[in-house]
Image (tube, rainbow, N blue to C red):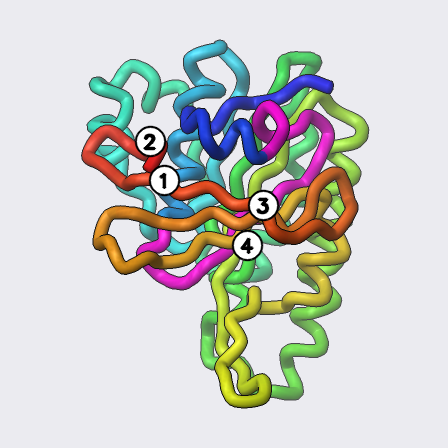
């Protein structure tokens, strides 16, 4: 199995070598836990190897300057093909047509975040049924791409809190759908140290797992072992 390194030895070790080829991976967590930084670091690792890189900035938060700082220059950043869909329907259209741009060249496709536009627009509760069906179609398409092409698919996901006994449980938005289609799931948590996060492995090679985790630091140059 071929892997794409995250650029962080501890996380690669947790994953058994990195992000697996031909799989859909999900990274979720609360705001400022490092989801986008981790995704960007994977993007740069792919660009260094002359792979194709497609980046869906569905949260409208992509920063070329930030990516340039992580890369130490603009050369790698200029190799990334950026999409910025303005609504959930536009995100669906781009995903449905993206395979027209794929070749035999290994490709990393990042959607940051896959549920950002799903939640946007002030949708009423009854409208989410249609959005659930659309999200399911998008994820099915991405899963097919990961199977048919030499590709890594990396999604980031937003979270929401729900009561569970005496505590509040933090879960991905559209959890059931995302867990169904994701072969790999990482959850990122805050820690008492301001620049340190905890990365928990929840699913690997399509099988639910528990207990494994690694800490990492967020620095000006990206993420590194914590």
Circle nearer the N terminus (4, 3): 4
Q: Earlier in the sequence, mark 3 or mark 2?
A: 3
The answer to whether residue 142 of the structure is visible from this angle is no
| Residue 11 higher or lower than 44, as above or below | below
Q: Which residue is mark 4?
A: 114
- Look at the image and say whether residue 29 sits in the magenta stretch: yes
- Measure the C-alpha gap from mark 2 to mark 1: 6 Å
Name the residue beneath numbered marker 3.
212
Quadrant in which the N terminus is drawn: top right
The furthest residue to the front: 211
Q: Are marks 2 and 1 in contact (CB under 8 Å)?
A: yes
Q: Tell me which label, 1 or 4, sits earlier in the chain.
A: 4
Taking the image as drawn, is residue 9 in sight? yes
Residue at 69% across, 69% down = 132
Residue at image x 52%, y 53%?
A: 187
Tag on residue 224? 2
- When asked about the image quadrant of residue 8, the answer is top left
């Amino acid at each position: 199995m071929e892997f794409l390194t995250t650029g962080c030895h501890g996380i690669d070790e947790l994953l058994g070598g990195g992000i697996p080829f031909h799989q859909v991976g999900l990274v979720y967590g609360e705001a400022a836990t490092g989801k986008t930084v981790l995704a960007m670091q994977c993007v740069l690792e792919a660009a260094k190897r002359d792979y194709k890189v497609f980046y869906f900035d569905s949260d409208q938060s992509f920063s070329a300057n930030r990516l340039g700082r992580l890369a130490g220059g603009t050369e790698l950043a200029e190799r990334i093909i950026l999409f910025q869909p303005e609504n959930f329907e536009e995100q669906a259209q781009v995903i449905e047509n993206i395979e027209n741009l794929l070749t035999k060249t290994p490709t990393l496709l990042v959607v940051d975040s896959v549920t950002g536009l799903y939640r946007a627009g002030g949708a009423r509760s009854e409208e989410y049924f249609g959005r659930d069906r659309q999200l399911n179609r998008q994820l099915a398409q991405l899963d097919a791409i990961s199977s048919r092409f030499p590709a890594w698919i990396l999604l980031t996901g937003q979270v929401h809190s729900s009561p569970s006994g005496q505590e509040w449980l933090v879960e991905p938005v559209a959890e059931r759908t995302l867990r169904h289609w994701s072969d790999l799931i990482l959850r990122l948590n805050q820690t008492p140290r301001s620049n340190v996060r905890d990365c928990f492995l929840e699913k690997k090679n399509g099988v639910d797992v528990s207990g494994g985790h690694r800490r990492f630091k967020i620095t000006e140059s990206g993420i590194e072992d914590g």
